[in-house]
């Protein structure tokens, strides 16, 4: 079986050296006629070969061999256009003997020695091999040739190595053997102490023979520089071989070398070194691997830790509100599903208390998010402190907290808890030197039966909250079945309002305001009206509240302002005399960033003088950022717009804001006016408000005057302006004419006439 050696790559440097040492550039092949004649006339050239790997390896089929030298010889045959005849010898020595006897013409590979030059001519060197010292494994770590003085050292018979050792190390007992195989067998058997051979041959033999207990321990100090030898009695043959060898290209040499020469040979690496290298490489790789594993492990640990942290954070965030740390909606829903399922099977009810912070948006909008966040955190803490262990507190909206309770269906207990929670929210919160007060409203729902859809319980609490906000702000309401219908109705109404705002369904009525001193109509309050096609007139407090809840209030307010300014312009054009038109402005409108420009643009577009516009604000505007409110008001007052405080006395009254802000009028709430002639406290409030307004140089107008007694009393108290059914109900704009105004003036009972 042919030995196929894995092709190995020699270094470029080695190939280059080989090339420079051995040959010049590939010569153009040219034979003289003498050479040509000689070649054609003579008998086939006999090439002696012996099995010396890698030059020649095992016979293929008795007559053929393969190997490095044979590859060269085949190329040379082709160049010479001839066929060599190969004679295979059992040993290298036998071949050399045949050459000496001139029974062969060419020696396939030999070192050029003086001794051999007696019978051989040599071509240029075509291969180099370093000879190594082989010993039994473990016998030597390192060795030199002199270490074998007095010892038996085997060398293939007839090789140049025999004479080299004999000449240079006469004390070494050279044992000539037929081939390397035998030498290695003797070595492993312990019959000799060392073997001299080039590394690749040693490697190959050990490979072939399965010998694995030999080591390379040093260099012989004599390298083979292999040439072709030809009998020197035929000088033309030598010339022809040289010429033929010169035709082998660098690429072909490279290809042959890489096919046959082991890397440990060309790079002076023997089997042991090779194995050691492999071991070293293995070691390095193992260490590197270990290091990588360690580092990888570390970074993996870090990664795992990091991931765990992230995971923790992610799972925390998945179920918690980032700001307050309370549970979030997701957790609430999942827990609710679990509770409602369990509750049914255990015949116990689950309860939801939904708490809405009233007017929280004002704190956020006026004092900034930082304070808003602080307030929410404190609220969360307070609520938590009031809840028992198995209650779940979740922040389910910007200004909403939800409490989930198990086994809770007792109305009395739940009512008490709702009161406690609302009271917790309502007690003032200090932030630096500021103090904030909020109120809360709650909606409560209790699981009545098995819930297919646990979210229904949340929806019911939400409905109850909405209802409580409308009817019972600052308190709680339990869910009732009709609330669902009301919700549907509200949703439909909001849709209808959105549509109505741009149609004639939506319009303004104007209620005259009179001077109690002169009786003249000084102005009108614009009051929004909605004429629903099916439901008829819908009361403003109903649709205004709806617009607030459904986020339509700004659109509605813009529409009112435009209609009022346009109407004012029209009246002026008609020659109607009046001082002002008062327009109600909701807080949400007022705090819009573009409020000032919107108002001024509307005035300009309508051509209505700013000095004839009065904006009615409620006290809740001043709950928030007073500085911002002041700026907004000042920007408009410097254009001539003036401000009135509507429903004065009902809101979060603070005398301070009256001093700070450019308010020119107070509108006393009709609730006080209603009781002015009947109850002492209303009278006192009205008196105090009048005094305060006057002290601050403000006009005071009383609204909701229905009786002459009320008017008389207010006139006595020096209230200078009034608005009420006594003088006129709110009127459609087209009804307001000079005649109508004169008629209204007539209805005012002047003091002098009284
Ligand atoms: P308000 O601004 O305090 O308006 C005065 C309300 O008192 C009006 O009710 C008016 O019709 C009513 N009123 C006037 N005189 C009397 C009286 O002698 N007796 C009685 N019982 N009521 C009297 P209206 O028009 O129903 O408006 C109710 C509220 O709706 C307004 O109170 C105001 O807060 C709001 N509103 C009306 N129009 C608008 C608007 O365009 N924008 C905003 N934001 N709110 C508006
Ligand atoms: Mg008003
Ligand atoms: Mg009012």
Image (cartoon, rainbow, N blue to C red):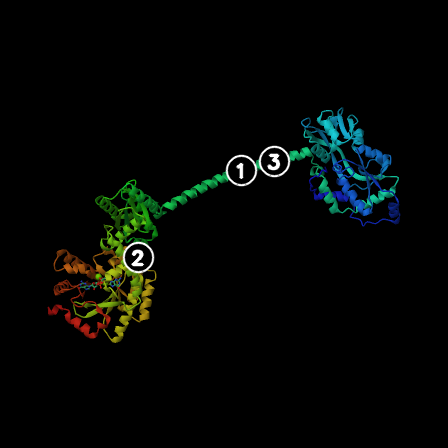
**Contact (CB < 8 A) between labels 2 and 1?**
no
Query: From the viewer's perspective, is the residue at label 3 or at label 2 nearer?
Result: 3
Residue that numbered label 3 is attached to: 282
Q: Quadrant of the N terminus?
A: top right
Query: Residue at 38% of width from left, 46% of height from top?
Result: 318
The reply to whether residue 154 is in sight is yes
Residue furthest to the front in view is: 61
Q: Residues within 10 Å of mark 2 (few under 14, many from 20)?
A: some
User: How much space separates mark 3 and mark 2, taking CA atoms?
Assistant: 77 Å
User: How much space separates mark 2 and mark 1, taking CA atoms?
Assistant: 64 Å
User: How much space separates mark 3 and mark 1, taking CA atoms?
Assistant: 15 Å
Q: Nearer the viewer, residue 705 or 250?
A: 250
Q: Position of residue 88 (x, y in %)?
A: 80, 36
Q: Is residue 12 left or right of residue 687?
A: right
For label 1, being within 8 Å of ligand 1 is answered no
Q: Position of residue 59 (x, y in %)?
A: 76, 37
Residue 721 placement: quadrant: bottom left
Residue that numbered label 1 is attached to: 293
Q: Position of residue 650 (x, y in %)?
A: 21, 57
Residue furthest to the bottom in view is: 574
Q: Nearer the viewer, residue 273 or 406?
A: 406
Which mark is on residue 627?
2
Q: Nearer the viewer, residue 244 or 749?
A: 244
Q: Position of residue 192 (x, y in %)?
A: 74, 25
The reply to whether residue 356 is in sight is no
Q: Quadrant of ligand 1?
A: bottom left
């Amino acid at each position: 079986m042919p030995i196929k050696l894995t092709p190995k790559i020699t270094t470029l440097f080695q190939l280059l050296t080989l090339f420079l040492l051995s040959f010049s550039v590939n010569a153009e092949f040219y034979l003289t006629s003498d050479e040509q004649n000689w070649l054609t006339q003579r008998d086939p050239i006999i090439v002696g070969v012996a099995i010396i790997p890698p030059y020649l390896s095992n016979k293929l089929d008795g007559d053929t061999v393969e190997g490095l030298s044979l590859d060269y010889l085949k190329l040379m045959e082709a160049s010479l256009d001839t066929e060599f005849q190969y004679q295979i010898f059992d040993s290298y020595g036998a071949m050399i003997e045949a050459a000496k006897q001139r029974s062969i013409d060419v020696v396939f590979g030999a070192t050029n020695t003086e001794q051999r030059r007696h019978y051989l001519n040599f071509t240029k060197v075509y291969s180099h091999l370093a000879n190594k010292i082989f010993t039994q494994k473990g016998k030597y770590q390192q060795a030199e040739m002199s270490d074998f003085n007095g010892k038996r050292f085997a060398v293939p018979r007839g090789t140049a190595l025999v004479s080299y050792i004999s000449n240079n190390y006469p004390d070494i007992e050279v044992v000539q053997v037929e081939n390397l195989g035998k030498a290695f067998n003797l070595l492993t058997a312990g019959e000799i102490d060392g073997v001299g051979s080039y590394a690749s041959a040693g490697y190959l033999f050990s490979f072939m023979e399965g010998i694995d207990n030999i080591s390379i321990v040093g260099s012989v100090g004599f390298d083979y520089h292999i040439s072709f030898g030809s009998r020197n009695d035929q000088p033309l043959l030598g010339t022809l071989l040289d010429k033929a060898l010169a035709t082998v290209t660098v690429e072909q040499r490279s290809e042959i070398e890489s096919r046959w020469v082991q890397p440990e040979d060309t790079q002076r690496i023997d089997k042991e070194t090779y194995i050691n290298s492999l071991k070293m490489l293995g070691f390095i790789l193992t260490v590197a691997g270990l290091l990588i594993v360690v580092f990888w492990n570390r970074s993996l640990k870090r990664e795992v830790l990091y991931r765990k942290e992230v995971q923790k954070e992610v799972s925390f965030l998945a179920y918690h509100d980032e700001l307050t740390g309370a549970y979030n909606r997701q957790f609430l829903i999942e827990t609710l599903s679990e509770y409602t399922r369990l509750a049914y099977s255990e015949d116990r009810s689950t309860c939801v208390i939904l708490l809405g912070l009233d007017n929280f948006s004002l704190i956020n909008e006026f004092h900034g998010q930082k304070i808003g966040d602080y307030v929410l955190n404190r609220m969360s803490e307070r609520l938590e402190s009031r809840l028992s262990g198995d209650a779940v507190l979740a922040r389910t909206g910007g200004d909403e907290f939800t409490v989930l309770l198990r086994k809770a269906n007792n109305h009395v207990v739940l009512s008490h808890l709702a009161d406690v929670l609302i009271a917790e929210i309502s007690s003032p919160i200090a932030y630096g030197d500021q103090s904030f007060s909020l109120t809360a409203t709650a909606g409560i729902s209790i699981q009545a039966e098995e819930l297919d859809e646990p979210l229904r319980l949340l929806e019911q609490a939400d409905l109850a909250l909405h209802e409580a906000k409308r009817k019972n702000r600052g308190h709680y309401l339990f869910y009732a079945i009709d609330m669902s219908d009301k919700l549907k109705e509200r949703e439909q109404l909001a849709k209808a309002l959105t549509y109505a705002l741009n149609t004639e369904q939506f319009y303004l009525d104007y209620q005259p305001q009179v001077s109690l001193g002169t009786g003249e109509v000084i102005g009108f309050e614009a009051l929004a009206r909605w004429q629903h096609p099916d439901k008829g007139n819908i009361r403003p407090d109903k649709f205004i509240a709806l617009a607030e809840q459904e986020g339509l209030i700004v659109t509605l307010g813009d529409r009112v302002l435009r209609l009022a300014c346009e109407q004012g312009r029209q009246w002026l054009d008609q020659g109607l005399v009046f001082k002002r038109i008062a327009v109600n402005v909701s807080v949400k409108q007022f705090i819009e960033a573009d409020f000032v420009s919107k108002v001024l643009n509307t005035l300009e577009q309508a051509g209505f003088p700013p000095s004839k516009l009065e904006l009615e604000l409620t006290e809740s505007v001043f709950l928030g950022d007073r500085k911002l409110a002041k700026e907004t008001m000042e920007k408009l007052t410097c254009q001539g717009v003036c401000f009135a405080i509507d429903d004065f006395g009902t809101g979060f009254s603070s005398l301070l804001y009256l001093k700070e802000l450019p308010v020119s009028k107070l509108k006393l709430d009709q609730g006080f006016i209603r009781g002015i002639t009947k109850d002492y406290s209303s009278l006192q409030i009205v008196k105090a408000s009048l005094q305060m307004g006057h002290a601050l140089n403000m006009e005071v107008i009383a609204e909701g005057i229905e009786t002459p007694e009320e008017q008389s009393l207010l006139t006595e108290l020096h209230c200078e302006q009034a608005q009420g059914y006594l003088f006129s109900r709110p009127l459609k704009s087209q009804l307001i004419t000079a005649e109508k105004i004169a008629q209204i003036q007539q209805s005012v009972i002047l003091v002098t006439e009284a």
